[in-house]
Amino acid sequence: MSLYLVATPIGNLEDITLRALRVLREVHVIAAEDTRTTRKLLSHFGIRTPLISYFEHSSLARLEQVLEAALEGDVALASEAGMPGLSDPGYEVVLAALQRGITVIPVPGASAPVAALVASGLPSDSFLYLGFLPRRRADRRRLVAAVARQPHTMVFFEAPHRLLASLADLLLLLGDRRMAVARELTKLHEEVYRGSIGQAIQHFAQPRGEFTLVIEGCTEPPVPAREEEVRQALRRALSHGLSRSEAAARVARETGWKKREVYRLALDICPTEADSPERLPIVLQGSLQPGPPG
C-alpha cells in the first residue's frame, strides 16, 4: 500500500495537476491538514473520496488511524495548500509511514517557496528555505544572525501581523539587501514586490495576506579562518585516515586558505595528535556555514 503526498493549489484551483486529481479520486481515503479547505477542492472537481483529518496537534490515535488506513489501501496526504510535509505536520506522517514499510510517493505541484524564488529576480541556483521565521524576536534574531554570512538566496514565510517586525530585524542584521516580497501568490491580489529591505518596510506599511520573503545572500567575501581553526580541521581530517596531502586539500577548500599554507601546518601535526573520529566529525567548527536543509 502507498501514501501519496499530493500537492494542492496555493491559491488558484487551476494549479492542481491531472495526476493529483486522479490520485485523489482513486485512493482509499484522503488525510487532510484542513478538511474544510480540502473539501472545497474536492467538491469543485466532483471528487467524493472519504476524508479524515490530520493536523499539527493531532493525537497519536489520529496518526495511527492514518497509518492503519494506509495499510488497508492507498492514502493521499493533502496539506492546506502546497506540498505536504513542507512546513506542515505531514513530516510526522511520512516518517511514521516509512518506519512501517509503507511506500511514500510524491505527487508534485504548486509550491509557494519555489514560485516566489523563481519570480524574485534573485539567484535561484542555490538557496536556503527556512520556513516560518520564529515568532519570538530573540529567536528570530538568533536565526537570522546564524545565516547572515550565507551566500545562498534565503526564503522565509511570514504572517502579516509580524511582517514589519521581521523586516526590521532583517534590515538590522543583514543590512539593506535586495529582496522580493511575494504576497497572496496565485490569488486575486497577488503581488511580487522587488526592492531593498528598507523599501519593503515602507511599501508594506499595512500588510495583509500571506507572505513569502526572498532575500539576497551575502555578497561579501568570507572571513578567512583563523590558524587554530585550520589546525583543528586538519586534526579531524587526519583522524579519519586522510593523508597530509588529502587533508590539506580538503581543509584548503573549506577555509579559503592556500593549499601549500595548510600543508605546512599539517607537517607540524603528528598523527597521534588527531582527535578521535568517534568524537569529532570532519567539519570545520566555527568557520563553515550550515548548508541548505534537506
Image: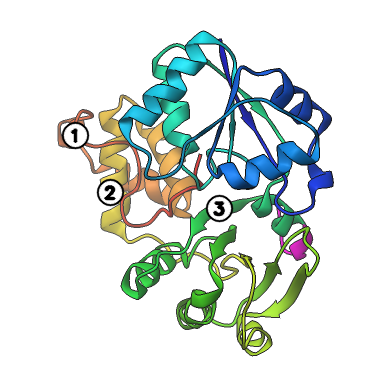
Q: Position of residue 200 (x, y in %)?
A: 65, 82
Is residue 120 located in the magenta-colored stretch of the structure?
yes
Identify the magenta region.
Answer: 119-124
The circle on residue 231 is 2
Q: Which residue is mark 3?
A: 129
User: Where 122 sits versus 118, above or below?
Assistant: below
Which residue corresponds to the image point at 23% horizontal and 29% vertical from the top-left?
277
Q: Is residue 56 magenta?
A: no
**Label 3 packing within 10 angstroms: few (<14), some (14-19), many (20+):** many
Q: Please say if 226 is above or below 266.
A: below
- 10 Å crowding of disc 1: few (<14), some (14-19), many (20+): few
Mark 2 surroundings: few (<14), some (14-19) or many (≥20) residues within 10 A: some
Horizontal side of 13 relative to 178 (left or right) equals right
Q: Amino acid at mark 3?
A: Tyr
Q: Are marks 2 and 3 in contact (CB under 8 Å)?
A: no
Say which of 80 and 157 sits in front.
80
Query: Circle 3 sits in a helix, a strand or a loop, which is it?
Result: strand
Question: At label 1, which amino acid type do we have?
Answer: Arg
Kindly identify the amino acid type of the residue bearing the numbered disc 2. Answer: Arg
Foreground tag (2 vs 3): 3
